[in-house]
Structures are given as C-alpha cells and as structure tokens.
Image: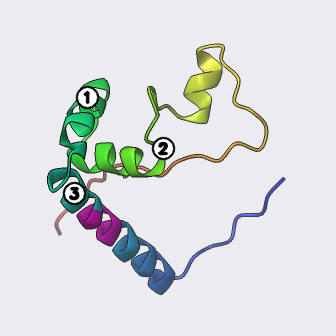
Amino acid sequence: MAKYIKKSKEDKKREMDQIIENLQNGVKEVFTSENYLNYLKFFSQFHNYSFNNVIMILMQYPIASRVASFKTWNKLGLKVKKGSKGIKVLVPIPYSYTKE
C-alpha cells in the first residue's frame, strides 16, 4: 500500500499555480490553432464538466472518451488496469461555515 505524503501549503500553492499556468497555455493552444474543431468535438463528450476540467482532460489524455473515479469504474463492473495512472481534474469541495 502506498504511503500518503502530506504536502505543505507552499507545495500545494506551487502545484495549483502550475495547473493554472497549464490551463492558460492549453486555452491559448486551443483557440489559436486548428485544434479548435477537435476541442469542440472533445467538449461535446464532456458536457457535464467545467471548461477548465475539459481543457485539463484534453491536455492530459487527448483520446479520452469517458472519465470517472476508480470507485465509479468498479461500480459499473469495469476494472482499471493495475499500475494505471489517473488524470487530474479540479473537484469543488463544498463547505459551510457559521458566522459568529
């Protein structure tokens, strides 16, 4: 079993900054080349995902046709190959707070 290594705030910020930079570069690439039509076809497959997540999926795995979590694939009766790597997407984390 793999150990989970807790990241520092600085590491998390650097990782998020890199993700945002990659997104910005991906957006520029999509809208300034002949890839626009390919993007529209790709986007139509992931209509329930945000614009940023579609760009991230496209950049990491351009031939993706479906994206789901490990647990979702198992619930659908589909197995993930051992050693396969996941792709990163931005997941909103709902929270609530009370004002004192």
Give the Cα distance between marks 2 and 1: 14 Å
What's the mark number on residue 27?
Answer: 3
Is residue 10 visible to us here?
yes
Span colored in magenta = 20-25
Of callouts 3 and 2, which one flags the residue occurring earlier in the amino acid sequence? Answer: 3
- Where does the image place residue 2, in percent across and percent down from the top left? 79, 58
Q: Is residue 72 left or right of residue 23?
A: right
Kind of residue sitting beneath label 3: Val
**Residue at 31% from the left image edge and 42% from the top image edge:** 54
**Residue 47 in sight here:** no
Nearer to us in this view, 58 or 73: 58
Residue 18 placed where, x, y %? 39, 73
Q: Amino acid at mark 2?
A: Tyr
* Residue at the image point whose x is 21% and y is 45% from the top: 34
Q: Is the Cβ of the residue at disc 2 closer than 8 Å to that at disc 1?
A: no
- Dots 3 and 1: beta carbons under 8 Å? no
In front here: 62 or 94?
62
- Per the rendering, the mark at residue 41 is 1
Question: In the drawing, does residue 56 fall left or right of residue 7?
Answer: left
Cα gap from disc 3 to disc 2, whole angstroms:
15 Å
Question: In the structure shown, which secondary structural element does the residue marked by tag 1 occupy?
Answer: helix
Residue 72: percent from left, percent from top: 55, 25
Closer-to-camera residue (29/95):
29
Q: Colour scheme in the image?
A: rainbow
What's under tag 1, amino acid-wise?
Answer: Lys
Asked if 69 appears above or below 9 in the picture, the reply is above
- Does 72 appear above or below 82? above
Magenta stretch: includes residue 27 = no
Query: Quick one: which residue is furthest to the front in this view?
Result: 34
In the picture of the structure, the residue carrying the numbered disc 2 is 61
Q: Secondary structure at mark 2?
A: loop
